[in-house]
Image (cartoon, rainbow, N blue to C red):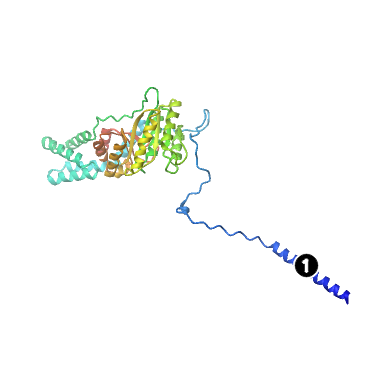
Amino acid sequence: MIAIIAVVAVLLVGGTAGLVVSSRRRKAELPAAKPAPELTEPKVGDDAEEPRDTPTWTLEDAELPESGATATLDKPESAQGRLVRLRARLARSQGSLGKGLLALLSRDTLDEEAWEDIETTLITADVGVAPTQELVEKLRTRVRVEGVSGDKARTILREELVALVNPGLDRTLKLEGKEGQPAVVLVVGVNGTGKTTTVGKLARVLVAENKHVVLGAADTFRAAAADQLQTWGERVGVRTVRGPEGGDPASIAFDAVKQGIEESADVVLVDTAGRLHTKTGLMDELGKVKRVIEKAAEVDEVLLVIDATTGQNGLTQARVFAEVINVTGLVLTKLDGTAKGGIVIAVQRELGVPVKLVGLGEGADDLAPFDAEEFVDALLD
């Protein structure tokens, strides 16, 4: 009896052990459960954020090809070639203003309604009220005395428009530094006017004139602004001094000028962050950037970049910038996309500062010196 009980016990223990082993084997064969994902609050803009494969660049200087490297640099177009091509483009985009005025002046009878139409055409083209009234008064006098037969209307209109654009203003860029130091050009303006692109294009112009140029990427607040400027520089073999994103713009501008002095550069071009003319703090920062630069070298040019398509709003911007910093020259961009070329006249009259450069397209060489007579001829072509 005892033996029988012992056998039964052995069988029960063995069966239980087998069940345990079998159960463990089945558990081992099942895939491991994945841990529950940690839930986090979504951030604004997460779905629109561009993924980064590489860390943000924080190098201070652009790495340029060493002497003898096989990198191919762009060869910028000559100044003469740009002027010929850009005049044709300006004539296509701005010609409606000149044609409209000529059509009105060539009427058999210039009554009050005709003169009102001339005023409306000029004001619509952003010439401004005061310059328009001045021009119309002079046209009235000359038409009354000289008449408008044949080509006389075009001759009178051309002469008065040229006088209004003021060919006597000094439009040369100040690119001769003091006492062997590089000339320093500070480029300012509101957001979206094309400052960084203008700096890159200007670098190309200067390289084509065999100038040694250094770029300063002092726009540290706009994403990829320094990358964009460095790309422009690398195309023509120009060094770009930059700093970490969100860094102090004045410090970077100062470093760029120091680099220019060390390299015996001819010109240092400093790109600044775009800022609304209504933001007092950001506007005051421009003054700081200029003061810090002048601890190393004098600032020879302050170029204010204005989008020509903004019309009278661009005039308001220019007025505020001129109050904060001593603007020495104007750059009008996007002049190819508007028939409102009168902003040239209005902004010069308002500030007493000449338009020195015009941008007439998206191409790398679509930047040229401004010439009053060329501009008026393009209007009337």
- Image quarter of the C terminus: top left
State the residue lying farthest toward the left.
Answer: 145
Q: Position of residue 184 (x, y in %)?
A: 38, 30
**In the figure, residue 29 lies in which quadrant?**
bottom right
Total marks placed: 1
State the residue lying farthest toward the top.
Answer: 179
Is residue 59 visible from the viewing direction of this image? yes
Q: What residue is shown at x 48% (from left), y 35% (from top)?
A: 60
On screen, residue 310 versus residue 67, left or right, reads: left
State the residue lying farthest toward the front.
Answer: 2
Residue sitting nearer the eye, 32 or 84: 32
Q: Position of residue 220 (x, y in %)?
A: 43, 40
Q: What residue is shown at x 18% (from left), y 43% (from top)?
A: 119
Q: Amino acid at mark 1?
A: Ala
**In the figure, residue 132 lies in which quadrant?**
top left
On screen, residue 16 versus residue 95, left or right, reads: right
Residue sitting nearer the eye, 123 or 256: 256
State the residue lying farthest toward the bottom.
Answer: 1
Q: Which residue is mark 1?
A: 17
Secondary structure category for the residue under label 1: helix
On screen, residue 94 versus residue 226, left or right, reads: left
Q: Residues within 10 Å of mark 1 (few under 14, many from 20)?
A: few
- Image quarter of the N terminus: bottom right
Q: Position of residue 283 (x, y in %)?
A: 34, 40
Residue sitting nearer the eye, 254 or 205: 254
Q: What residue is shown at x 31% (from left), y 29% (from top)?
A: 172
Residue sitting nearer the eye, 237 or 293: 293
Q: Position of residue 186 (x, y in %)?
A: 37, 34
